[in-house]
Structure formats: structure tokens, C-alpha cells
Image: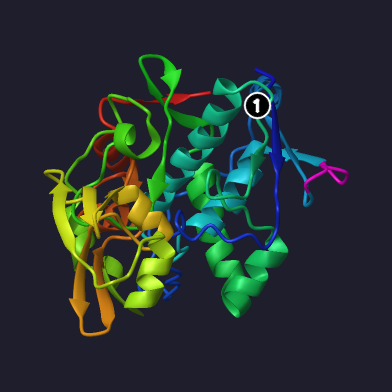
Amino acid sequence: MNRLLVLVVILLVPIAIFTAPDDEAVLKTEDHEDISLEMPLASEKEEEEEETIQVMLSTNQDKSDAFSMDLEDYVVGVVAGEMPASFNMEALKAQAVASRTFALYKMDSIQDYVLSVTISDQVYLTQEEMKEKWGSDFDYYYQRVKDAVERTKGEVLTYQGDLASTYYFAISNGYTDDGLTIFNEDKDYLVSVDSSWDKSYQSYSSTYTLSQESFCSKLGITCNGIVITDEVRADNHYVRSITINGQIFTGIQVFQKLNLKSTDFTITVNGGNVEILTYGFGHGVGMSQYGAQGMASDGYTYKDILQHYYQDTEITKL
């Protein structure tokens, strides 16, 4: 199967909303599997070469320096950029499958779609960037990420035979959110599910403090005091709508305008300041990366993780 994926990599553009907080503590234990040293048969090698999928990469918007690389090498760069390499191997494998599927889904579902490093797509790190990120630990972390990709080579998530839209994010409020509300994608597998593993991590909650003037300016409202009414939350506690000084906002609008970490937020007026408490980090749809880590630590496999966060999907080979 020959496909051509075109990816524009715009370096130095952060997409922190999709990326888990960096937490590269060295693991105390290893979970390597035995690797066979037996050489493949000639027919197997030919078949593997026939199945190679190439990705076109570029470091600038006009694609003038585009070059081709193997899909699996691309996935290594994405996993390195999107998830702490210190995470459990099963979590890394789940990330590899989700990242591979996400890229292929975009290319298959939108004609001539060009992937880029924006909040809509995925972070990609070159080996030089990985070396800068990991320093003297580069060899260790690179091998962990590469192992995760190789152990899931060619695996993608499908739903009723089609590639799944595998959104993911850093950490939830204890539940994921649904794709219809956040991305207007009505997918049976992008529904709210329990992710209580997230609550045990330090990044679970955050507090912001800003002046009333800054708060009002960011929201574009008059600021003769702050009155909050008619707050509506979903069963998973994410804010769906809220009225501030008579103006109605969706939870997503407040999340974006105030640059919050989550749509599960509580606003409190304290004198001349506004304090905002949030739970979670990211848009909340699909796989929670810290939830995946929690599940893996509890003994779940990457397949368990993927099929929990993407309900009723199947793992298939390209």
C-alpha cells in the first residue's frame, strides 16, 4: 500500500494545549521485551518494503526544503514531542498508535490536507531537538520512544472499518469530554469516559490570579464590577455556558479568551482580583496522556488504554 503524506513542520511553534507537561524523570525499572535477532526471509523483507509509507517534511511554510521520510520515523518524532519519554512503555505505545492514526486520518479525510505543527495537529521533534531536550539522557529516552513505535509498527485505530479521529490531550478533570461539544465531531468513540487516574498527578489543578481590568479586557466586557450568573455544567463538570456581566459565553470561549488550561473552571472575585481554579490541562477529547500513564501503571496494556479512551474502536494493521 503506497500513500503519500505531506507534513509541514513549522519549528518553534508551541502547541502546549496538546502536549503533556514535560516530566522526564529517569525510570527506576525497565520494561523491555525480547527482540528476535533472526533475519527476515527475502519475501518478508520485500513485503515490508512494499508497505512503507513516506511522509513529506518541511521546516518552512512554502515547503521549499521538503524531504521524504518513513512514517514510522515520523511517529518517533511525534511521540518524543507529545509525551514524556519517561512514561510507562504501554502509555508510549498507546501514544504511538494514536499519533500514527491521527496523521493518517487527517490525510485520508481531507483532500490535499497539509499537516503542520499547530494546535490542530501534532508536535514533531527532530533528533537534534530531542538531543537538546534530553541532553545526556538522549540515548536512553530515544531508545524508549523508538521501542514503543517499533512494537506497534503499522498499527492504527479504526471504527467500523475507517480510520478513527484520535484526538488526545495532557490531563483531564477526572473525565474526558465529548468530540461533538469541543470539535463539532459527532463520533461514537469520542464520548466522555472516566479518567480518574488523572487526579493523582500534580498537574491536575491550577490557579490563575489576574486583575478585574485584565479579566474584563480579555473577555471584551464592561468592568463595573463582575457579576457571574447562569453557570451550566455537563455531568462531567466541564462548563458549557456562563453569563458574565450579562454576556453569555460558552465554556470553550472563556477557555480560549483567558488562555485557561481546561474548560472545568471556577471563577471567584476576590477584591480587585479574579481567581480562577481549573482542573485538567487541554481540550479534554480522546485520550488523556496522564490517564494513559495511570492506566499503564495499574497494569493495563496499550490496547486497553486505546479502547477505553476511544470507545468501540479496533486496532488494525495498515
Residue that numbered label 1 is attached to? 48
- Amino acid under disc 1: Glu
Q: Position of residue 156 (x, y in %)?
A: 46, 30
Does 64 appear in magenta?
yes
- 54 and 287: which is toward the camera: 287
262 lies above or below 25 = above
Q: What residue lies at 63% left-to-right and 31% top-to-bottom? A: 40
Does 22 appear in magenta?
no
Q: Position of residue 2 (x, y in %)?
A: 69, 20
Most frequent secondary structure within the magenta stretch: loop
Answer with left or right where residue 294 lies relative to residue 289.
Answer: left
Magenta-highlighted residues: 61-66
Q: What residue lies at 69% left-to-right and 24% top-to-bottom? A: 112
Q: Position of residue 269 (x, y in %)?
A: 20, 75
**Residue furthest out toward the top:** 161
- 171 and 293: which is toward the camera: 171
**Residue furthest out toward the right:** 64
Can the viewer see residue 289 in this picture?
no
